[in-house]
Each structure stands twice: as C-alpha cells, then as structure tokens.
Amino acid sequence: MPRTILLRDWLNNLFPRQHSEQELTIEPASADASFRRYFRVTLANGDTRIVMDAPPEHEDCRPFLHVAALFREAGVHVPEVYAQDLSQGFLLLSDLGNTTYLNVLDATTAPKLYRDANAALIDMQRASRPGVLPEYDRALLERELKLFPDWYVAKHLGITLDTRQSTALSSVFSAILDNNLAQPRVFVHRDYHSRNLMVIDAPYPANPGIIDFQDAVYGPITYDLVSLYRDAYISWDEQQELDFVIRYWEAARQAGLPVAGDFDAFYRDYEWMGAQRQIKVLGIFARLFHRDGKDGYLKDMPRVMTYLRRTCERYGELRPLARLLDELENRQAQTGLTF
C-alpha cells in the first residue's frame, strides 16, 4: 500500500472527523538527504502539525525520539512529539514553521540569529555526558572521510588515484583524525547549520527551532560550530566568521565548557575539524547526485571546496591535500600563509 495512504489512515485514526467536510489537509513540508519526508497537516481547527514519514525499512525513528528528549532536557527548542507509530515509521510533531535561518540570514539579521544559535549550542554542550549517544570515534570519522576518494574523486571526477596520491591522502586523513580525536567531547548535533535552524519570532530559548538531529553523536567540541560558520549553503568573509567564532568561544569559556584557553589553538582545532567535515560533505554531495539522482547539492560544492582549500593551504601538515586538489582539478598551485 502506498505510504501516502498509510499516512492518511494513521492521521484519520488520530483525528477522527466529526463531519465529512473536515478532511485533513496534508501538504509536503520538506525532504532531506535521506529517505525521510515531512508533511504539514492542517487540522479542522486550523492548527498545523508536522508528520515525519520515515520508512522503517530504511530509517529508524528511535534515535530521533532519544535525541529530542536529550536536547529538550538541555533547554533548547526541538519539536514536541505528539504521537508515534514506530512500526509504520510515522511521528506527529509540533510545527516550527517555514522560515529557516538560510531564508533570512544577511548582514543585518546574522548577529542576533547567530547569538541565539550559539546560546543553544552551548546549552546542548553543557548537557553533554558520555554513554548516552553513539561515539563519534575514529572508525566513524574515517568512514566519512573515505566518501571523498570513493564518491568525489572516483565517481564525480572519474579519477583513479595513483599510489603516491593515495599515500598522501591517507597521511593527511591520519593527521586530521588525530586532531579531531584529541578535542574535548560533547553532544554533537552533526548538521547544525542554516537549513536545520528555524527562525522563531521570540528570543532564545524559543529561537532557534532545531531540527534534523537524529544522527547526533558524542564527539569533538568544534564540530557543530564549524557546521554553523562554514555552512555549505551560505558563507561569510573570514573576518566576519572570526567574529562569530570568537563570540561563541568567549561565551563557551564563561559557561565552563572545555574549550582551549588560547583562541589561536581553538581556531586551529575548529579549522581542522572543518577539514574533516568538508571532505565528508564533498563525498556526500557527490553520492547524492550519482547514486540518488539529487542534483540540488552540486551548486554548493564550490563553497565547500573553498573552505577546504583555505585550511589546507594554511597548515603545513595539510598542504599535501592542497597539492592533490590542484592535481585533481588541474589547477596551478597557489602560495598562501603557512603555520
């Protein structure tokens, strides 16, 4: 039976109609990079809800419920869960609206919106404790890095790395992982960026509404921060980015979070964590296109590559990757600051 029919039957059981004209209105709300889909349901009284449709053969709703409870306990704004049917893969959630951060971010709105996003991130991190979320361990971080040679290099560029290139890439990956795993560990949303933060017309803690957190893990403290400020979908000049990151760092120190006491050291960790994420994202975007037929992410690849190049050209240990990118793209190697 089509899932749309299963979904409507489930909702009709939740909201029995008193009159035939009180048909529930169900409209697409959004989709993401997985098999999950979201629908906005308008009830007879005009209230709206969001239904997550997560086919159980592909998705598991239990991590979403678990992380929602953890983050709600931390005091941040995540959707309320009104009803669930795990066997069919349906959740009925509160509606956080249509307006993402990405819809409205500009030079005027960014300071306030990012101040709220920093506050929410710090509260999530302050609530962190080991043993309640999966570990963002070396195996998982490395598996993500390997999406780059498998999907971006081999599939998207159509290039087979030679032995020298593979060795150089493995060496850089090892250095990145050593840095990532040496960082203090906290709850990590894992996709804390402008498409997953909803604008709520109220100050923090109502704003932002936070979604798409079901893949949360326990891992490096800079991961969500670099997701936020080296966003695949919007970018800022580096001076502005530095300002945003410094404001987080100062607030995190005041909150007692285990960030480095020296900002230069913290920013280095932030950039190296960013390199891991950007390498992964390039692989994911390539996979979404070539395996899943989703081409909407291709336009964002150059932004992600710009972030990665900036970092690799800045740090000596990562320069072999910068040279490899030049070779892959047949670009003239550029000189830059080296630390």
Image: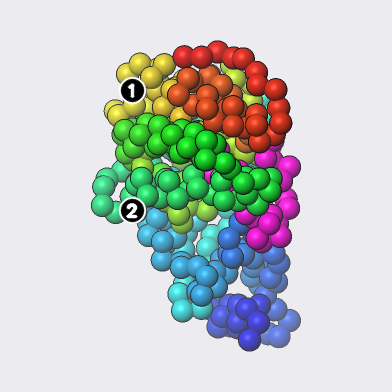
* Picture quarter with the N terminus: bottom right
Q: Secondary structure at mark 2?
A: loop
Drawn side of residue 65 relative to residue 227, left or right: left
User: Which numbered tag is attached to residue 339?
Assistant: none
The quadrant in which residue 63 appears is bottom left
Residue 293 spot, x, y in % from top left:
71, 60
Residue underneath mark 2: 133
Res 271 visible? yes
> In x, y percent, where is residue 42?
66, 67
Q: At x 62% / y 15%, what residue is drawn?
A: 335
Mark 1 highlights which residue? 260
- Is residue 73 at all visible to an observer of this figure? no
Q: Which residues are magenta?
A: 276-303
Colour mapping used in the image: rainbow
Residue closest to the eye, 140 or 193:
140
Q: Nearer the viewer, residue 337 or 46?
A: 337
